[in-house]
Image (cartoon, rainbow, N blue to C red):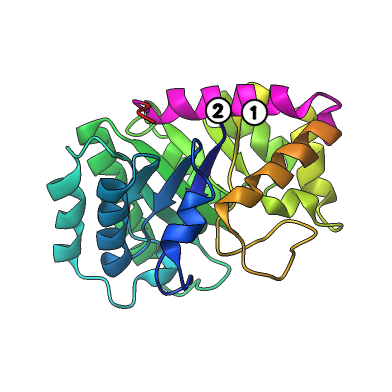
């Protein structure tokens, strides 16, 4: 069994969402919300498909239409057994660095919910290492179960995060020619700290780079990790699947 631990399989990106999900039969897809409307889609997909689990959250790049009221959707659905985390949440100073305080406020509000309901958090962090690390290593949040999705910082930072018990999501970027730094991270960091994810529809791995990504391509990411670590792809599946089951506390029902 394979688990794509991070995807955005929404109607706005795919003509036929059902077809994309059916290709992952007997495997698991975790769909992550980023705004009010697609959080509602996450809930629908979770209720419709046995093999789809979801996380609800408000992404730092999608705060223009955010209203505090919207956070209620998280609490209202937190007891749905298919909702296994809070995300995608975080900090992104690459696309927007003039609303840092607002980003931090909304990020922390969602971390508070994760703490209250003991849920795993799925974090996006871009050009924001310092604030992300300071928040996650604070006494208030250091016991949270955390996944840093689409890991893209260097090895030294990876070691700091894994020392906090944080798991790193490895995306299709690892297959890009330019991604030397990420391959170094994958080589040096033990498999027990890694997850595999597509971030579909974005970041399709080679040889589909630039095309629309889909959860099935998570296999290409596993293959690349196997190649870098010089182990079998089965070992990558075994370890990363078990990591995901534990980190999200998944009750598998296929
Ligand atoms: Ni994402």
Verify CB contact (< 8 Å) between mark 2 and mark 1.
Answer: yes
- Does the magenta run of residues contain 243? yes
* Apparent side of residue 208 relative to residue 150 in the rendered image (left or right): right
* 84 vs 72, nearest the viewer: 84
Which residues lie in the magenta part?
228-251
Q: Magenta-highlighted stretch: main secondary structure? A: helix
Q: Secondary structure at mark 2?
A: helix
* Apparent side of residue 13 relative to residue 190 in the rendered image (left or right): left
Quadrant of residue 66 in the image? bottom left
Picture coordinates of residue 219, whole percent (x, y): 68, 42
- Tell me: residue 30, above or below residue 241: below
Ligand 1 under 8 Å from disc 1 Cβ = no
- Tell me: residue 136, above or below residue 177: above
Q: Quadrant of the N terminus?
A: top right
Picture coordinates of residue 18, whole percent (x, y): 42, 59
- Identify the residue position indicated by label 1 in the image: 237
- Identify the residue position indicated by label 2 in the image: 241
* 63 vs 186, nearest the viewer: 186
Picture coordinates of residue 89, whole percent (x, y): 40, 53
Question: Dot 2, crowdedness within 10 Å: few (<14), some or many (≥20)?
Answer: many
Ligand 1 under 8 Å from disc 2 Cβ = no
Q: Quadrant of the C terminus?
A: top left
* Apparent side of residue 82 relative to residue 153 in the rendered image (left or right): left
């Amino acid at each position: 069994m394979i688990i794509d631990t991070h995807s955005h399989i929404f109607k706005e990106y795919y003509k036929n969402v059902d077809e994309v999900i059916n290709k992952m039969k007997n495997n698991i897809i975790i769909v992550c919300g980023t705004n009010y409307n697609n959080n509602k889609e996450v809930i629908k997909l979770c209720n419709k498909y046995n093999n789809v689990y979801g996380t609800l959250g408000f992404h730092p790049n999608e705060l223009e239409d955010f209203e505090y009221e919207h956070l209620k959707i998280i609490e209202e659905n937190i007891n749905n057994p298919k909702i296994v985390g809070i995300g995608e949440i975080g900090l992104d100073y690459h696309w927007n660095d003039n609303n840092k305080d607002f980003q931090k406020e909304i990020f922390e509000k969602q971390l508070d919910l994760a703490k209250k309901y003991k849920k795993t958090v799925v974090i996006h962090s871009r050009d924001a290492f310092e604030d992300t690390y300071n928040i996650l290593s604070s006494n208030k949040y250091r016991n949270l179960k955390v996944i840093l999705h689409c890991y893209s910082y260097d090895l030294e930072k990876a070691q700091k995060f894994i020392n906090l018990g944080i798991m790193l999501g490895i995306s299709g970027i690892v297959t890009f020619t330019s991604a030397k730094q990420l391959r170094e991270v994958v080589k040096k960091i033990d498999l027990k700290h890694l997850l595999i994810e597509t971030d579909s529809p974005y970041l399709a791995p080679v040889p589909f780079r630039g095309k629309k990504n889909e959860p099935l391509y998570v296999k290409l990411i596993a293959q690349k990790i196997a190649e870098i670590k010089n182990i079998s792809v089965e070992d990558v599946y075994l370890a990363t699947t078990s990591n995901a089951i534990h980190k999200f506390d998944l009750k598998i029902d296929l």
